Image (cartoon, rainbow, N blue to C red):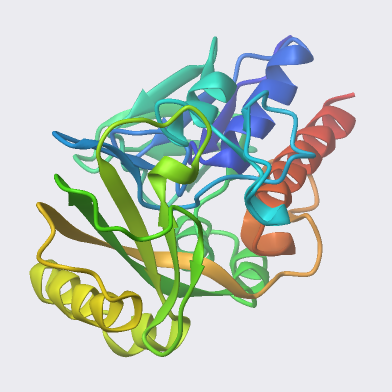
Amino acid sequence: MTERIAIIGAGLAGLSAARALTAAGHTPVVFEKSRGLGGRLATRRTEFGPIDHGAPGIPENVAIDGEAWPGADASMRQTGLPGVSALARKLSDGLEIRTQVEVQPLMRAGAAWALTDQAGASLGVFDRVLVTAPPVQAAALTAADAGLAAEVETAEMSPLWTLLLAFADPTGLEQEVLPLEGALSKAIPMLAKPGQTGLERWTVHASEAWSEANLELKKDDAAQALFDAFREQADVPGEPDYLAAHRWRYARVRTPLGRPFVANAEASLIAGGDWALGDLASHAIESGKAMAAHVLDAAG
């Protein structure tokens, strides 16, 4: 009998686990609280064109068939069109995914797990649940298994503010990744990515220290502060025609779990993600595949 399997989170870890399980003959159901897929593989659609406002790309050794980006560093030599979120859509093809569903802390149902949504409605009872949310959220979801939740909590993540910019008139800046200092980490021009055309668009990453110190800043205030810092370092002429900021509360892995996942004895509850192994997209994929393999081993 095919087992009922739920996966919480449609980032790279969750989608990779779902694909591996589907290839083995299972039909997992993926629940995602946001509208989009891919987690930090995120693209903002604007009237000026797409702007990737999370991870700029993924390593070239990750098999997603993205667009090669030869000029990028090793962590982002593959991206997507019209934006990096296209990589997640490729992974999600053919999967059963329910978006805008915020799963509440899991409840035991005999040897299985009962899932409910934010309105308290039942989402079903599942033999196995894979949780790929960030550590703080994953610990809350798995609180019914105190031992597993405590292990999840040993992993830590730090936040990231990103700045999104577009200019109707060219700034004259070189269209290449710019290393920055102080409040900022780097600036990534969309026009440096393969296949990108149109108006000049940038994503600027804040530093970890600035993001931590300004975590609860209002988005408009964060956008202006980050643009002021960028203009000071990059000598940007004039004002942008598009200015916005996005906060990733859980963006960088500060302290990884140290192994691909954590699971209870019967492998009915498993938690993992990039935070299990490290910062890279490849770490998320490795964790997702390892979780799926653990389920398949347990299921016989």
Compared with 9, 239 (above or below) is below
Taking the image as shown, residue 3 lies to the left or right of residue 35, namely right
Quarter of the image for the N terminus: give it: top right
Residue 143 appears in view: no
Name the residue located 72 percent from the left edge and 22 percent from the top edge: 21
Q: Give the camera-side residue of 32 and 182.
A: 182
Name the residue located 25 percent from the left edge and 58 percent from the top edge: 171
Where does residue 31 sit, x and y in percent of width and height? 43, 32
Give the total number of marks visible in the rendering.
0
State the image quarter where residue 43 is shown.
Answer: top left
Q: Give the camera-side residue of 292 and 60.
A: 60
State the image quarter where residue 97 is shown.
Answer: top left
Quarter of the image for the C terminus: give it: top right
Q: Give the camera-side residue of 261 and 228.
A: 228
> What residue occupies the far front of the structure in this picture?
172
State the image quarter where residue 127 is shown.
Answer: top right
Compared with 65, 17 (above or below) is below
Q: Give the camera-side residue of 190 and 64.
A: 190
Where does residue 237 sit, x and y in percent of width and height? 17, 68
Compared with 299, 109 (above or below) is below
Where does residue 121 sit, x and y in percent of width and height? 25, 32
Compared with 145, 87 (above or below) is above
Taking the image as shown, residue 164 lies to the left or right of residue 182, namely left
Residue 184 appears in view: yes
Name the residue located 70 percent from the left edge and 42 percent from the top edge: 285
Where does residue 162 sit, x and y in percent of width and height? 33, 64
